Each structure stands twice: as structure tokens, then as C-alpha cells.
Amino acid sequence: IQKRCFSIRTDSINRLNFCVVHHGRRFRTCFLNPQNNKDNILFESASMLALNAGIGEAVAMHPVDGGANNRVYKIECKEKKALLKAYFHHPSDPRDRLGAEFFFMKFAWSAGIRAIPEPLGCDRVNGIAIYEWVDGYSLKPGEIKLKHVLQALDFFIELNKSKNSAYDLNAGSEACFSLSDHINMIERRVLKLISVNPFSETDRQANEFVKQ
């Protein structure tokens, strides 16, 4: 399995930080404004998690590209780097994204699987977790070879060797355990698409396509 970037670290919370971020093969310049209360909470919580994980106080935090619903940061600490993930939460969506992912990662790590970043700590109140930072990049469709498929297969085989110890794990946010579960999930998605108000001709055509 191609490892992904995970790690943490913080610095001065009371001043504006200017940083150049190296992400993949690109450089990006960004400003982190500690005057933002949400950023302050993120800094402080990440630093505490880093200290508890034994990698030292966080001294810098840089946004990382590629996140979808969640926000991801590279944290630089006194001992090593880590990845900070701030999980998306909405009052209308009760799913525990943080708990499902973090405790699955802990389970896999405790089972001896090392094709994943090590989970280092989480803060349920602020909805964040920190993981080992692993340098890497996402494979593009044309780059996926047989060896990568076999690595994924090895991951599932190793993971399922410990399945009898996994009963305490929460189900994934859209886990399906039967054919009817899959059908119900698809129906819910289709209903959401049908209920979208079309604001353009493209929206209207997409809406008609889904109804067909």
C-alpha cells in the first residue's frame, strides 16, 4: 500500500507565521493567522496531542492540499513531523467520522499492520486526530500496476486475520453488510440528487438523468 502523509508539530501561537510548504512535487506559500480563534484551538489541541504522543511540542502547522470534507495539516514538532486531520462535522450528519477512522487505524496498527501511518492521538471534543507523517503521493490511474493491487490484497488478508477482535469497532460511515444495505444506500443517494434544486441547464439535465 502506498503510504500517505501523516504527522504533527506547532510553534508560536501568538504571531503570524509565514511558511513555504512542500507538498508532493509543488511548493505553496501560505499564511496562518493565529488571530483566528479556530486556528488557535487547532494549534493548542495539536500541540497537546503531540506532547502526549512523545514527539514534542508543535512549532509550525501548514495546510496540505488534497482534502475533501476534512482539513489536513502538516505539523512540525520538536522531535518529528506529523499529520493533523480536522474532521468535518455537521449538525444534520451524526456520523462519527473521527471515531470510525482513528479507532480502525489503532486496531490495524495493534494487529501489526505497518502499511498505514501510526495513529498518535485524537481529541474528540475538537474533532481532530494526529497521525505519523509519511512522505508520499497519490497514484494516478495510469500508474497503478499489478504490484499495487497485490499490496492492497495483502493488506486485506492481513487485516482479516484479526477480524475476530474487531467486534468493538464502529461501522464505517457508509458501511454495508448485506445486499439490502447496498440498495438502501444507493436509494438514499438517488433521492438526494433528485431533491437538488436545478440552478442551471446543466443542473436540470443532470436532474432529469437521475430521474430516468
Image (cartoon, grey):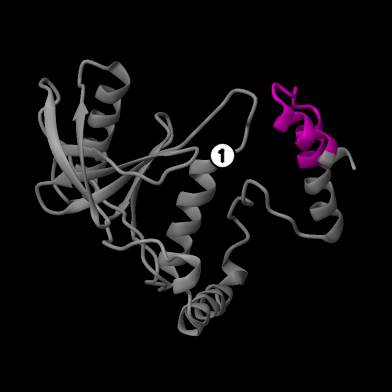
197 in magenta = yes
In the rendered view, does 67 fall on the left or right side of 208?
Answer: left
Image quadrant in which the N terminus is located: bottom left
Q: Nearer the viewer, residue 174 or 105?
A: 174
In the image, the segment drawn in magenta is: 188-208
Image quadrant in which the C terminus is located: top right
Q: Nearer the viewer, residue 199 or 50?
A: 199
Magenta region, mostly helix, strand or loop?
Answer: helix
Residue 40: x and y in percent read 25, 23
Q: Which residue is mark 1?
A: 96
54 in magenta = no
Amino acid tagged 1: Asp
In the rendered view, does 202 fall on the left or right side of 134?
Answer: right
Please tell me whether residue 70 is drawn above or below residue 164 in the rendered image: above
Residue 59 visible to an observer of this rendering? no
Residue 70: x and y in percent read 45, 38
Picture quadrant where residue 177 is located: bottom right
Residue 7: x and y in percent read 26, 51
Q: Residues within 10 Å of mark 1 (few under 14, many from 20)?
A: some
